[in-house]
Image: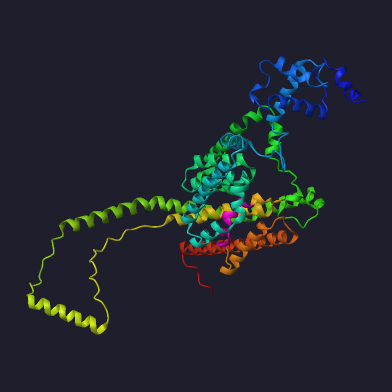
Amino acid sequence: MENDDYQPLLRRRRNSNLRWMESQVLEFLELVLDLVKDVPESLEKPTAQKFYAKVMERSYTFKDLNYVVLKNKMRLLRTQYISAVHWRSDTGPLVYPAAFVYIYSALYYITSHGSNVRLAQYIFACIYLLQMCLVLRLYAKSRKVPPYVLVLSAFTSYRIHSIYVLRLFNDPVAVVLLYAALNLFVDRRWTLGSICFSLAVGVKMNILLFAPALLLFYLANLGLVKTLLQLIICGGIQLLLGAPFLLTHPLEYLRGSFDLGRIFEHKWTVNYRFLTREIFEKREFHLSLLGLHLLLLLCFAKPMWTFFKSYVRLRKVQDQLMPQIALKNREVHKESQKKTKTKEPKQETDQQLTGEQKSFLKAFEKGLQHSTGRKAAAPAPVQEAQPERYGIHFDQCTQLALLPFFVCNFIGVACARSLHYQFYVWYFHTLPYLVWSTPYSLGVRYLILGFIEYCWNTYPSTNASSIVLHLSHLVLLVGVARQIFNTMRLNNKVKSQETTLQNGQPKKQQ
């Protein structure tokens, strides 16, 4: 009876277009792996005919087949493997863009085919330190958050350290490229920034949550034509990275790597544990979250644009004033050098004291020390007054650029259909900045950060942790919105007053 299962295959053994059953494919792969497990380079060596003859000798299923059939099947399986459609891990199929494949393939070979885990952990520890440098540079420029808050956030998050050094997820790689791009954008190095941003998208698609803010940032700083040029650079890099996949299986690659309709597994969710699996996987639920996401982006679009335009105006003022400030500082420095050179040596006007006078003064000084119980203070060195230098900390206007980026990403995270534990890194380093952009008291700010940290450290997630996470997100978003729209009202009030002054005093009411 066992031989009857393979009769369809045997009857068409001379035909290369066979419909292989899954059991036959698995048996074929096991035979091939058994032959090449010691020497992987021996696949189809010395010739394909001799190699597959060994396969046919070891199996009744394939013994009467032509070796060309097996060769073609192996070629098909390798092509499907390259297409990334059938790649799977413990959490599902491969759903990442091409840069992820390249980076982790390099890590695979660097770590001796994945066996040297400690080396991989050292590499990710370096990635974490690099990201901290990039994040702290942005915070230092903006001067928004007290330094001690950054120290606390760097040393207190167990989940973040686990994501970087223990789990070795690709999310940290994508995020470090993103912060590199933000630093480059703030330094107005647009092309390099676009390259880093596109590489980050090539590692993981979640970086596109920053894309709406980046588009407005491009338009505010560069105008339409140069914005199109930067978008072409971003798109061109994606085409180059995905070329091996796009040339073979373009639809499968795009559908897998940039699938906006992907259904996540309910068992891994952090933010919707309180929902049933049926509701969690409903398309209507996904569309409602997408609609909420777009609606919030539209509500914040005008303030974001206003912040970016104000940032551009301050940068223009910086470009106009910095040469003048530098020139003034050079003049002050030259004048101080002239005064130093022309200064005459100090003339000694004190008369020479006699020995009796010196002994009397020493005895008098000792008497004073004995009566007061204090030692004589050493004479303070005379320091010449340094000339005052002129300067304005224009980097503080970075606040106007960072807040829209962070808010845009936070809205995407808050409206996500599912959050897995590694997703915490998407917005963890922006949370102190967002919390300090609210009108809340210091205690409420720490409570928000503490509740969010608690939710992400609860494993497995519970109904309570998911609800608390949503409430924390809601309170934080409301606080940021209040602060932003209060700033907008103040800005409009100032503009109206300026318009009134420009048009002359208003007519007195009769």
In this picture, is 489 found above or below 352?
Answer: above
- When asked about the image quadrant of residue 389, the answer is bottom left
Q: Give residue 300's position: percent from left, percent from top.
A: 62, 55
Q: Give residue 456's position: percent from left, percent from top.
A: 66, 56
Q: Residue at x 49, y 53 (%)?
A: 138
Q: Give residue 452's position: percent from left, percent from top.
A: 64, 60
Quadrant where the image shows the C terminus: bottom right
Residue 345 shows in the view: yes
- Residue 169 lies in magenta, yes or no? no
Residue 219 shows in the view: no
Range shown magenta:
424-437
Q: Give residue 171's position: percent from left, percent from top.
A: 61, 46
Q: Is residue 2 left or right of residue 396?
A: right
Quadrant where the image shows the N terminus: top right
Q: Residue at x 64, y 46 (%)?
A: 206
In this picture, is 390 found above or below 265?
Answer: below
